[in-house]
Amino acid sequence: MRTEFRSGWIGWCAGVLALAIAPGAGAQPIEGLNLDELPEQVRLGVRVEMHRRSVGVIDALVIVPDGISYLHAIGAWTPERRFPVLIDDGSAQAAEDIARFSRGFKPSEVIRWSHPDAMPGDGAERRRLIEKTKRRIWGLPEDEPAANSWKTDPRLAPGVVVMNEDDPAWTAGFALAVGRAQPIVWSERLGQIGEEMALRDAERFARFVEEACEATGLSWRETGDKLGGVTIAMRAPVRLNNGERIVALTDFVGRHGDDPRGEQRWGWAGHIFGNEARAAYMAMSALFYRPEQAWLFNGYQTTGSPWTDYNLAPAREQLEGMGLRVADQGRAGSHRAWQLASQRVLRAGLVMVNSRGMRDHFDLNPGTARPGDIPVLDVPTAVYFIHSWSAVHPGTRGTVAGRWLERGAFCYFGSTDEPYLQSFLPGPAVAQRMRVLVPWGAATRIDRAPIWKLAVIGDPLWVVGQKQQRVRGDVPLKDAVELRAEMASAAREGRLEEAVRLLSVMGRDGDAASLVASALRDNPEKVTPGLAHAALMPVFRAGRGQDFIELYRKLGPDEANDPARRDALWHVARPMLEGSEPERVINLLLDHVRDDETGSDAAAIARAMGRAGGTGAAIAYLDRIEPRNDRDRRAMEAARQRLRGQP
């Protein structure tokens, strides 16, 4: 079968799997069910889900300040019980990631803990400590191969994790190796995200991974064998040049090199990169988070071939069959519809979009959106984006994939080059596969297709299974501090900035916004730049647009010029520009035209100035703005013509 399972097969799989690994069934197949009867992709996902459901999750989120505390906190996991751990490195991105995860995971308590030791500065010592901790958790003797313990249990060792001891994404590799009981493959450095890997280097890396799989003693040569996933948790180019074309590294790894067309696959790869805090967030989202909502957006017309084949609306039935609430743009979605949706926070944990365009824009029907139009995410989100070039430089915020990842996407599927539409699986087919537990790395790919340009970012073994069992009990970390009491004390003593920060990481945006609203109303002098910065995004997520604008005016220069905060400002202020009193925000936006959105931002301001009765001033303003590229120039010229009354 080339693209998707037949509907009857989907129904059979869904029914049998619901019984086979139902909660309370001990996470073992029911009598008479043979895993070998399932398609290889389903079999792999079932093994991941069986293991996931066999583990109890302590209903708490642990926040640590650094890598050594993270390592020791995970060291308190057992094969039967665990809890999520995130790193707060003091950055705004880490604070947003923690708050986003907290809103998605919804822990009963959030605690803070730190370890007194320092992380070893030597990479070899760090590697030894990681391996020692992992083996202790799983009860593996240091001198005995993991395969001796993992050969017989069908739940364990679904893949390998490739990492480097000096790369900050070790935090993701370590968590996924422990959390999914996977062997670690230690690799040399491979280069940077935005580079192109040479074919000879990619071939050497792929063979290195295969040799490491062979050394485990676990089967791996065929899909459906013991090892089916390859998680690359380190910096590496997302694409390689094979001399004829660009292809994605994650579609190259996991193929048999002796197949001239590259169609014979043995595994499915995914790629995680970023600093320690961000990589930990991506791994913890894959291990502990289950979406509750999905969002479908058709940027294509919904009539005429081939567009009808890629209509996302039919995915609704499959997603609802997974227990997700679905919001969709049933008809062709316009740029205007996209902007309306982006004015508020997006609460969907699974997003599917189809569009056309390049790395820095995506065409809708009608209209063209830019990375700055991508909505702010309320919870960790997996994104399936049918589009050319979106993942050419996913480490750069000026690209489509880069902005989704900055916003908090923990899984992403998109193209590193021009792939042609038929290389994508239609969204409904992806949803079908996910419904029967096919993991992310396999659910998004066409079966038996040649090596191509589409990249899997995130844990390739992530599945949308059932909610994990929450268990009672304290987190086994000495001297851990519960944040609820700290927050109450800070609020009682008038330390508003601290109270708001704590409320935010606890996922309590509404309470944080109410606290700040009272201060703005009754004691505006207490709203310092620090408090405004801490409260800005909670207030955005709470939907308090006027309070957001007031807080933005109080930010210090560095915070006000932060690119992510500027995006949020434009999400809030754009509808105000189009309202009856645009003067309330024009002056603020004049100081915050975005570098990568210069043309569209300047045009929006000029149109608002014109509506307010200042046509001449609006045209003069546009004449003072230096366009950065042809797209800016076209947007600004269109605004001039509109102001002059030209068609």
Image (tube, rainbow, N blue to C red):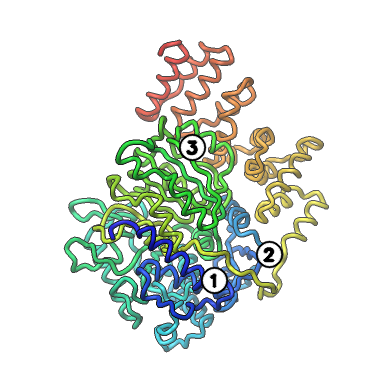
- Please name which of the two marks, 2 or 1, marks the residue nearer to the observer: 1
Q: Residue 327: x, y in percent?
A: 53, 44
Pointer 1 or 3: first along the chain = 1
The answer to the question of whether label 2 and label 3 lie on touching residues, with beta carbons closer than 8 A, is: no
| Residue at which label 1 appears | 22
Q: CA distance from mark 1 to mark 3?
A: 41 Å
Q: Residue at x 81, y 36 (%)?
A: 522
Where disc 1 sits, the SS reads: loop
Determine crowd level at label 1: few under 14, some 14-19, many 20+ residues with C-alpha closer than 10 A. Answer: some
Residue found at the far front of this picture: 8
Three-letter code, disc 1: Ala
Three-letter code, disc 2: Ile
Q: Relative to 71, does residue 218 appear above or below in the rendering?
A: below
- Please name which of the two marks, 1 or 3, marks the residue nearer to the observer: 1
Pointer 2 or 1: first along the chain = 1
Q: Residue at x 47, y 23 (%)?
A: 603
**Is 634 on the left-hand or right-hand side of 566?**
left
Pointer 2 or 3: first along the chain = 2
- Res 562 quadrant in image: top right
Q: Residue 303: x, y in percent?
A: 36, 36
Three-letter code, disc 3: Asp
Tag shown at residue 346? none
Q: CA distance from mark 2 to mark 3?
A: 34 Å
Q: Look at the image and tell me whether residue 64 can be seen.
A: yes
Q: How many marks?
A: 3
- Quarter of the image that includes the C terminus: top left
| Residue at which label 2 appears | 111
Determine crowd level at label 3: few under 14, some 14-19, many 20+ residues with C-alpha closer than 10 A. Answer: many
**Is 245 on the left-hand or right-hand side of 230?**
left
| Residue at which label 3 appears | 373
